Amino acid sequence: MLEAVYIDKNLELVKACMQGSRAAQFELYKLYAKAMYNVALRILNYEEEAEDVLQESFLDAFTRIVDFRQETTFGLWLKQIVINKSINYLRKRKFEFVGTDEISEIPDEISADEYEVKSQADEIRTAITQLPDGYRVVLSLYLLEGYDHEEIAHILKISENTSRTQYMRAKKKLKSILEQKGMRDE
């Protein structure tokens, strides 16, 4: 029951935004800004760019809110805008995904808890920011945002194999960074 009320509350705010309510826009901004900023920051790794993406995303969302068809939640719709804008910022930086020609098979994926995520989250977060852009983006989209490799390939306009390879290499690099900091797999 509580979840339904929460969803209805946001839907009422979205409908008010569609009618031009600035107060409703501000309420939606307060509800989603922190989470959307964190999504952008995980992809971009630069606070200033994440702030720019956040502002541009909300501006876009409020400008195009009449296009929102409620096929998904407002939050998921907004998150897609944030991710797309973040990827565009990265493209402006001209980062490249490493090709996969030299890799013939991709090993099975290993569970995310191999680094004891709960107890060492800060060290892991810091290590993720040290990954090259391509690695960090795929790892973030897969592990933190919950996208699968097919979705990541579509979002980044790369092959699924490249997504899997980037993810595998990102985990290997992340493990190396964490080992240098004295963190070991248990």
Image: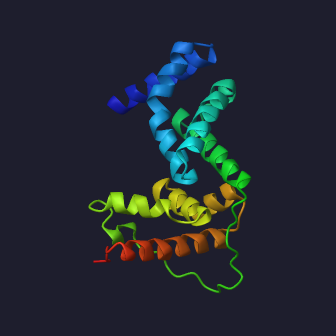
Q: Decide if residue 12 is in sight here.
A: no
**Of the pair 133 and 87, the residue shown nearer to us:** 133
Left or right, residue 144 beside residue 62 = left
Percent across and percent down for residue 52 are 61, 37
Percent across and percent down for residue 66 are 68, 24
Q: Residue at coordinates 63% horizontally, 40% vertically from top-left?
A: 81
Percent across and percent down for residue 32 are 48, 33
Above or below, 91 against 178 in this view is above
- The count of marks equals 0
Q: Residue at coordinates 31% horizontally, 77% vertically from top-left?
A: 184
Which quadrant of the rendered structure holds the N terminus? top left
Percent across and percent down for residue 58 are 60, 30
Q: Residue at coordinates 62% horizontally, 68% vertically from top-left?
A: 163
Color theme of the render: rainbow
Left or right, residue 183 beside residue 160 = left
Above or below, 79 against 102 in this view is above
Left or right, residue 118 beside residue 93 = left
The quadrant in which residue 14 appears is top right
**Of the pair 8 and 101, the residue shown nearer to us:** 101
The quadrant in which residue 80 appears is top right
Which quadrant of the rendered structure holds the C terminus? bottom left
Q: Residue at coordinates 67% horizontally, 31% vertically from top-left?
A: 60
Q: Decide if residue 87 is in sight here.
A: yes
